[in-house]
């Protein structure tokens, strides 16, 4: 072993340990909050993150991703608990675990048949519309928690309509904890001090919220008066945890696992979890300083195994989570050791100091989820897709609104159907849309990838395979779209993602300049009408 290598090892190990510890500080409150919002016991989220860190780290190939529970699955999880339990939350929880076990087996099958890569063919606008709907639902539910009020409504629009009533009848002490927590989450990242960037905002929230809960004596049930009104507070406003980690283990109830309702949630957990996880891995690969590309199917297999273990002992479903993964990259992580350290820190903390978790106010966790929901449903995302084209805005809004009015699976399905209909209206026949192929031509000084058919989302995988067949030392690749009547946004975004790991290769896209563009955006859809006024 060379001296240079020996010098590098402690350095990278130290960076991974530091990154893993910082991610642990971010993950701890989020795991608790996601579990509570999902209708699971709060420790279930921590249990999943421990498995994601300590077990899945060594099974996948995405070196910098953090495995754990995600806000994007909250809507599915709480829906499963409520519908399968039929009013009995404890029964619903155990039946939801059974759904999780079967969904994990489906994900294992997906990985075995190499289905994970299909996730990258999903329309970004449909995915972001789905996430925006999830964000709105999270905010509508958790805003009441932040104010210390239990709403009467259950449906999303009932919860939104009740927000003014909850604000008027908010518990002042709980509201103060929630609002201060939310302000910290919003304002802390904007501080320009170097030390502020090192300390995660969720940790600052806990540093403020826990002393406040102690000052308000939330651990003991009592009554106080404010503004001439009487308010009650007590331990029910704090996180409730079992005495130790082993006592939190719960087992699935398979009694209705093949009922129509269970099958619906199995499909949603498997599909949405796979898509979210795959897109997260692709996004993290894009910001990896070393530009390493993960094996998506191998990583899905790791997530599936983690889900199988977690669901079997009472945990939430997991994915490769994007927010914590980005924090991991930003903190300087170099390998899977960072994810392992994050899981190990969670295990040690819960094992040695479970009592500290019981001091966390639910309002602080509610504020974290409201903040997370606001980022998922940010209006900036709609502005962004509108810049790409009216078609992408239509896909985004259709998916979001249908999801809010019905459920997630129907919303995503409607978004995808609308995408296909738009392609048909623009002249793409089913044969060309789903039977496109990419021809690889070696021209000596360059490799030409000529697309035949339609350059749309089904063709993204063929393009990736063709690019992977091109030697890495190739200096120029030409993607020839001369013969195609339509190029969609997913395909153009797919080109960008697929070429990130080829920094020394010049990639030119030609032949689509004469097609009509939905907008001036470089990734806007284009189709075979005369170029002119944008749609």
Image: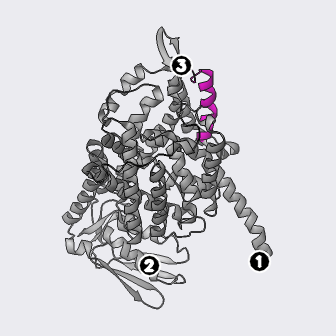
Q: Which mark is residue 380?
A: none
Picture coordinates of residue 300, whole percent (x, y): 45, 64
Q: Is residue 328 visible?
A: yes
Residue projecting furthest to the bottom: 444
As helix, strand or loop, the secondary structure at mark 3 comes to loop
Say which residue label 1 marks.
1
Quarter of the image for residue 191 reads top right
Picture coordinates of residue 54, whole percent (x, y): 59, 57
Q: Quadrant of the C terminus?
A: bottom left
- Residues in magenta, as a range: 201-221
First in sequence: mark 3 vs mark 2: 3
Quarter of the image for residue 274 reads bottom left
Dot 3: few (<14), some (14–19), or many (≥20) neighbours within 10 Å?
Answer: few
Q: CA distance from mark 1 to mark 3?
A: 63 Å
Say which residue label 3 marks.
221
As helix, strand or loop, the secondary structure at mark 1 comes to loop
Q: CA distance from mark 3 to mark 2?
A: 64 Å
Residue projecting furthest to the top: 228
As helix, strand or loop, the secondary structure at mark 2 comes to helix
Name the mark nearer the viewer: 3 or 2.
3
Say which residue label 2 marks.
467
Residue projecting furthest to the right: 3
């Amino acid at each position: 072993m060379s001296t240079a290598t020996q010098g590098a090892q402690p350095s990278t190990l130290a960076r991974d340990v530091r990154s893993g510890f910082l991610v642990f500080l971010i993950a701890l409150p989020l795991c608790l909050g996601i579990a509570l919002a999902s209708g699971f016991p709060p420790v279930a989220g921590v249990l999943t993150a421990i498995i994601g860190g300590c077990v899945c780290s060594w099974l996948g190939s995405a070196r910098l991703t953090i495995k754990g529970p995600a806000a994007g699955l909250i809507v599915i999880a709480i829906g499963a608990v409520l519908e399968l339990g039929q009013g009995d939350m404890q029964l619903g929880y155990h039946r939801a675990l059974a759904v999780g076990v079967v969904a994990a087996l489906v994900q294992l099958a997906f990985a075995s048949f190499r289905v994970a890569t299909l996730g990258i063919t999903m329309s970004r606008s449909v995915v972001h519309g789905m996430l925006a709907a999830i964000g709105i639902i999270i905010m509508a539910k958790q805003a009441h928690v932040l104010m210390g009020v239990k709403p009467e409504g259950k449906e999303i629009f009932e919860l939104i309509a009740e927000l003014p009533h909850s604000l008027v009848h908010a518990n002042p002490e709980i509201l103060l904890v929630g609002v201060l927590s939310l302000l910290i989450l919003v304002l802390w990242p904007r501080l320009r001090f170097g030390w502020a960037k090192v300390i995660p905002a969720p940790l600052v929230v806990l540093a403020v919220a826990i002393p406040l809960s102690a000052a308000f004596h939330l651990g003991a049930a009592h009554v106080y008066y404010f503004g001439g009104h009487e308010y009650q507070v007590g331990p029910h406003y704090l996180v409730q945890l079992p005495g130790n980690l082993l006592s939190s283990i719960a087992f699935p109830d398979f009694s209705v696992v093949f009922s129509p309702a269970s099958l619906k949630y199995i499909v949603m957990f498997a599909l949405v979890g796979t898509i979210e996880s795959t897109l997260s891995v692709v996004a993290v690969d894009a910001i990896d300083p070393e530009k390493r590309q993960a094996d998506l199917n191998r990583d899905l297999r790791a997530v599936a195994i983690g889900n199988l273990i977690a669901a079997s002992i009472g945990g939430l479903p997991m994915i490769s989570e994007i927010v914590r993964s980005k924090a991991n990259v930003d903190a300087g992580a170099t390998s899977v050791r960072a994810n392992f350290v994050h899981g190990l820190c969670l295990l040690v903390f819960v094992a040695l100091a479970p009592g500290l978790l019981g001091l966390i106010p639910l309002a602080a966790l509610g504020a974290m989820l409201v903040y997370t929901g606001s980022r998922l449903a940010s209006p900036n995302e709609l502005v962004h897709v509108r810049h790409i084209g009216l078609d992408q805005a239509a896909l985004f809004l259709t998916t979001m609104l249908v999801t809010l009015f019905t459920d997630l699976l129907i919303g995503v399905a409607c978004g995808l159907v609308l995408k296909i209909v738009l392609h048909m209206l623009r002249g793409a026949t089913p044969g060309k849309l789903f039977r496109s192929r990419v021809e690889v031509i070696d021209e000596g000084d360059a490799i030409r990838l000529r697309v035949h058919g339609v350059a749309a989302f089904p063709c993204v995988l063929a393009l990736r395979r063709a690019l992977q067949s091109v030697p890495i030392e190739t200096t120029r690749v030409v993607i020839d779209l001369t013969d195609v009547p339509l190029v969609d946004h997913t395909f153009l975004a797919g080109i960008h993602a697929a070429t990130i790991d080829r920094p020394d290769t010049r990639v030119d896209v030609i032949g689509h300049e004469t097609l009509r563009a939905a907008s001036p955006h470089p990734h806007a859809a284009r189709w075979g009408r005369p170029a002119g006024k944008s749609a």
